[in-house]
Image (cartoon, helix red, strand yellow):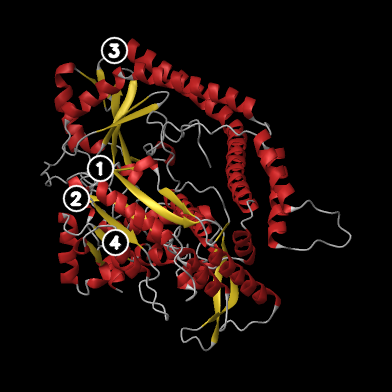
Amino acid sequence: MKCRYLDQVHPGRGVTFATGTPISNTMMELYTMSRFLDPEGMKSREIEHFDGWAATFGEVVDTMEISPDGATLKPRSRFAKFVNLPELQQMFRAFADVQTAEMLNLPRPKLDGGKPTIVACPMSDEQRSLQQALVERYDRLRSQKVDPREDNALAITTDGRKLALDARMLSAQAADFPGSKVNTLVDNVGAVWNRTAPVRGTQLIFCDMGVNDTPWGYSVYDEIVQKLVARGIPREQIAAIGDADSDAKKQVLFEKVRNGQVRVLLGSTAKMGTGTNVQKRLVALHHLDAPWKPAEVEQREGRILRQGNENEEVAIYRYVTQGSFDSFMWQALETKARFISQVMTGDNALRRAEDIGGQELSYAEVKAIASGNPAIITLAEADAELQRLTVLKKNHSDEQYLARRSLRELPEHIERLSKRLANLTADQATTTAHAADSMTIGDRAVLRTEVMAVLGNRLEALPEKVSDLRRFPLGVYRGLRFGMVLHPQFAPEVYLEGATTRRTSLSRNHGPRAVMNALENLAEGYESECSTARQDLAIAESQLRDFQERLGIPFPHDAYLTQLTALRDQLKAGLSGGTSEPDADPQPDVSQLAEQIKALRTSNTIEAAPQRVTKRRSVAEEPVTARIRRQRPEVVPSPEPVSEPKVVEPPSEEALSVESTPIAADDQPPLPGLFPHDAGQARLCPGTSR
């Protein structure tokens, strides 16, 4: 309601949102952003209600989920896929100005190694047995009618994340495993603490689980603090964000971290993410577990990769228990983050995509993780390769479409350019042949000494304001007709007309001297106009030859794409444990399929696409502000300051005989983006896409 009110008071500029994560976990968040920032655009497309938006951009499925009280079930409609993604991106970019950290080149510390460091930790025997129990639970969900209030996929996924952190999160009988993530973290934090002691470097530890004690009394936070103290770190230099239970206490704690009094700070994403400005001395950040959302990863790492950090290089560590849910969770987070980034920047080339909001793992994923099958990695690599091939094929299709369209349009364009060049050359010859002729104003020739006075009278006879575009012929200059073009809102123009027409703008306060200077500039500019026309003609002819050569070339990786897709589908079916038809031919096992995929990828090398010299601009709809101003002309400010009304003396009887004619559509001034010397003819540039 507040946004709607501000938008009515200040059309197109009522409210501005500034956020680092407009899409945190699901594409449906774009609907909410559009409701706040582009209500008029959604109304004009008749998708202001969620049902209309969902029918346009989503495929909805109905599932059952547990209610918050845990005692009843309720139906839930959620998106399975998103469709029409290019149009959705265009709508988003119509009101969003996306600036990533790479675009802004902010003064942030460098990341050690250029990317987060993965710290792999072995899995204990107890963790393996507990993880196998998770697979059996999921197997019961598939084979039996288990009440979702008793067990469900999301509960299994949550237990898998706890197990990856430490076996004692699930079992009271589990022992402290020396190679666990907690012990590895403590060793790493202690080493960094000793190494950065001279500069009093600080560290952050993020962990969303294990904050509170389990029913059998185990707490990850308490164990980390105890073991860090045992390694020699003073207890007063270690703090947990939960100890500061008010905003005032948080600010005191943050100041201690900035000063180096507290050098190790533990916390969850919710409490230590947004608003935690302690980057001054931060040298390392530790992810002990993987959060649910890619936006939470960005919020975590934004605490250290931030302006104001005095260290030139910092480190980010991600702790992963091998063979556990950790690796898949981080892979899923990276996939989600990459897709969100592509949608934000307009680089996504797909029309359909799975929603990124799902949190539970599938049965196949859980089974592959538990078995430690390396084929799951091969499947992920094949999916990434297929996505790359799909983008390349779409780019090839776009190039073929451009070639076909250009071959239809370029011959006419070349003909127009040739005709324009001939007309410009003819007008240039006319101005040269009549350079010494007297100027004609109205129906009579005027001596050079009288030009200013006579022309001034003709100009004073023109109306001060017009409601429509009007053209007023004034006379002949160097063999070509000339006159004035008056606009209802913009500055007047002087035109010079022969075989072709050229125009130039004047200021609001124009007089005979300004008109004469404009005519002289137009007459002397034919040489440069002819040179530009020759260059444009040469470019168009070169483009025609290039598109003729490119048309009909097949996609070079089509066979590779077909073979890899078939093998990927077979591998995915094999990992899911699906059974084949009785009469079907025997299929290779999972390991054989993985080897075939590796061999196929090795024998097909795809060269990297050439980098663009300039970054491709996302094709966006008309911006919201421009659309509102166009629809409400009364609020459009004049592009140039309006001068005070000038008192004009009654014109003479001769001056009143000036004839005015409406400007035809063909005489409209050129629009932005078109040739300034060829109104109505758009320039065809290499790389233009539909």
Label annotation for residue 200: 2
Above or below: residue 508 compared with residue 235: above
User: Which residue is the site of mark 3?
Assistant: 435
The image quadrant that residue 397 belongs to is top right
State how far apart marks 1 and 3 are (Cα). Answer: 60 Å
Residue 406 visible in this rendered orientation of the protein: yes
Q: Nearer the viewer, mark 1 or mark 2?
A: 2
Above or below: residue 223 compared with residue 687: below
Q: Nearer the viewer, residue 615 or 118?
A: 118
Of the image marks 1 and 2, the number of the one nearer the N terminus = 1
State how far apart marks 3 and 2 are (Cα). Answer: 81 Å
Mark 1 secondary-structure assignment: loop
Of the image marks 1 and 3, the number of the one nearer the N terminus = 1
Disc 3 crowd rating (10 Å Cα; few below 14, some 14-19, many 20+) is: some
Asked if labels 3 and 1 touch by Cβ distance under 8 angstroms, the answer is no
Of the image marks 3 and 2, the number of the one nearer the N terminus = 2
Disc 2 marks a residue whose amino acid type is Arg
State how far apart marks 4 and 1 are (Cα). Answer: 37 Å
State how far apart marks 4 and 3 are (Cα). Answer: 97 Å
Asked if labels 4 and 2 touch by Cβ distance under 8 angstroms, the answer is no
Disc 4 marks a residue whose amino acid type is Ala
User: Which residue is the site of mark 1?
Assistant: 107
| Residue located 27% across and 55% down the image | 203
Asked if labels 2 and 3 touch by Cβ distance under 8 angstroms, the answer is no
Location of residue 215 in the rendering, given as x and y in whole percent from the top left corner: 42, 81
| Residue located 42% across and 16% down the image | 425
Location of residue 556 in the rendering, given as x and y in whole percent from the top left corner: 67, 33
Disc 1 crowd rating (10 Å Cα; few below 14, some 14-19, many 20+) is: few
Of the image marks 4 and 1, the number of the one nearer the N terminus = 1
Asked if labels 3 and 4 touch by Cβ distance under 8 angstroms, the answer is no
**Left or right: 42 as drawn, with respect to 584:** left
Label annotation for residue 230: 4
